[in-house]
Image: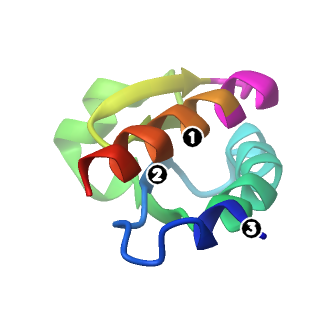
């Protein structure tokens, strides 16, 4: 059974990827995290920092930046083992609130 099927009523986790066009590290991060997102039924929200002056100022030299909910969990490169652990912990917390 997939992890996302353990609790069919659980809210999907939201992962935000702050990125910009032409960023090879951003493309790499997105492709690395995609299988984990699918496994846990998490939603990916991509935000182009160049479309917002505040975000461009905040993350200009740090993209990609990845948030899980409202918590920053990675920048520049993704440690997949750590990312998977963070997604799993967030899913468990979400499931325990239901």
Q: CA distance from mark 3 to mark 1?
A: 14 Å
The residue singled out by tag 3 in the image is 2
Residue 64 in view, yes or no = no
**Viewer-closest of 14 and 92:** 92
Please state the extent of the stretch shown in magenta in the rendering: 76-84
Which quadrant of the figure has residue 75? top right
Q: Give the numbered dot on residue 30.
A: none
Q: CA distance from mark 3 to mark 2?
A: 19 Å
5 lies left or right of 46:
right
Q: Vertical placement of 81 versus 97: above or below?
A: above
Q: Position of residue 36 (x, y in %)?
A: 74, 53
68 lies left or right of 22:
left
Q: CA distance from mark 2 to mark 1?
A: 9 Å
Q: Position of residue 58 (x, y in %)?
A: 28, 26
Q: Secondary structure at mark 3?
A: loop
Residue drawn at point x = 42 percent, y = 66 percent: 12
Residue 8 in view, yes or no = yes
Q: Give the numbered dot on residue 87.
A: 1
Q: Position of residue 93 (x, y in %)?
A: 37, 38
Q: Earlier in the sequence, mark 3 or mark 2?
A: 3
Residue drawn at point x = 72 percent, y = 25 percent: 77
The residue singled out by tag 2 in the image is 15
Residue drawn at point x = 48 percent, y = 47 percent: 91
Q: Earlier in the sequence, mark 2 or mark 1?
A: 2
Q: Nearer the viewer, mark 2 or mark 1?
A: 1
- What colour scheme does the image use? rainbow
Q: Vertical placement of 13 versus 90: above or below?
A: below
């Amino acid at each position: 059974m997939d992890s996302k099927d353990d609790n069919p009523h659980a809210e999907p986790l939201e992962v935000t990827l702050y990125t910009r066009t032409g960023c090879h590290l951003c493309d790499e991060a997105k492709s690395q995290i995609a299988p984990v997102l699918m496994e846990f039924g998490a939603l990916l929200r991509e935000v182009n920092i160049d479309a917002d002056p505040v975000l461009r100022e905040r993350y200009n030299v740090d993209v990609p930046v990845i948030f899980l909910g409202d918590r920053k969990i990675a920048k520049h490169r993704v440690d997949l083992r750590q990312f998977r652990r963070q997604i799993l912990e967030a899913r468990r917390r979400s499931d325990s609130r239901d």
